[in-house]
């Protein structure tokens, strides 16, 4: 779970252990150190145990009965400079706005590639990047969203 790149250490928080493992391996192939947590509580415990070592966090929006939105301000209390990207399979404009208001750097819909996740952290891209997928929405989805 460690690699030579000590400048970037990603905290991955998702209740899907398989997803966390796959994302962790993909980031580590790019020489990015990762630590994983499968709940908001595990994430807080990990930070308390390891200290403020994380430069980035990737947080799932829905983790069972818990919300990644509630975790954002808690993580920022430990480190106000932490860059946070929220991933979700349940995208809506309301949750996107709420995540950004709470301090997330960006918000992506699943499935998101490692390249998309890394681009979401790029400060030069944050204001230019679309917060919603460029794929057209179905009529059912449009009606549900609006």
Image: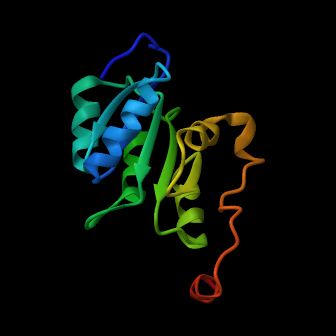
Rendered residue at 59%/49% (across/down) = 106
Which residue is at the front of the view, 2 or 126?
2
Q: Quadrant of the N terminus?
A: top left
- Quadrant in the picture for residue 96: bottom right
In this rendering, the answer to whether 47 lies above or below 127 is: above
Q: Is residue 16 left or right of residue 144?
A: left
Q: What residue is at 26 percent from the left and 67 percent from the top? A: 65
Is residue 78 visible from the viewing direction of this image? no
Which color scheme did the rendering employ for the protein?
rainbow
Where residue 35 appears, as percent x and y from the top left, is 32, 31
Residue at the extreme top: 4
Depth check: 52 or 28 in front? 28
**Percent of width and height locating residue 73:** 43, 49
Q: Position of residue 127 (x, y in %)?
A: 75, 47
Q: In this view of the protein, can residue 18 be seen by the observer?
A: yes
Q: How many marks?
A: 0
Which quadrant of the structure image shows residue 116? Answer: top right
């Amino acid at each position: 779970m460690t690699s030579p790149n000590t400048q970037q250490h990603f905290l991955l928080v998702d209740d899907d252990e398989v997803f966390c493992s796959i994302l962790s391996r993909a980031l580590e192939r790019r020489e990015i150190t990762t630590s994983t947590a499968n709940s908001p509580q595990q994430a807080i415990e990990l930070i308390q145990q390891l200290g403020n070592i994380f430069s980035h966090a990737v947080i799932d929006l829905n983790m069972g009965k818990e919300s990644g939105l509630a975790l954002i301000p808690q993580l920022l209390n430990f480190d106000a400079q932490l860059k946070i990207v929220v991933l979700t399979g349940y995208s809506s404009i309301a949750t996107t706005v709420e995540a950004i208001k709470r301090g997330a750097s960006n918000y992506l819909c699943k499935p998101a590639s490692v390249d998309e996740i890394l681009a979401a952290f790029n400060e030069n891209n944050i204001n230019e990047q679309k917060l919603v997928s460029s794929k057209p929405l179905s009529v059912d989805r449009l009606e549900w969203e609006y």
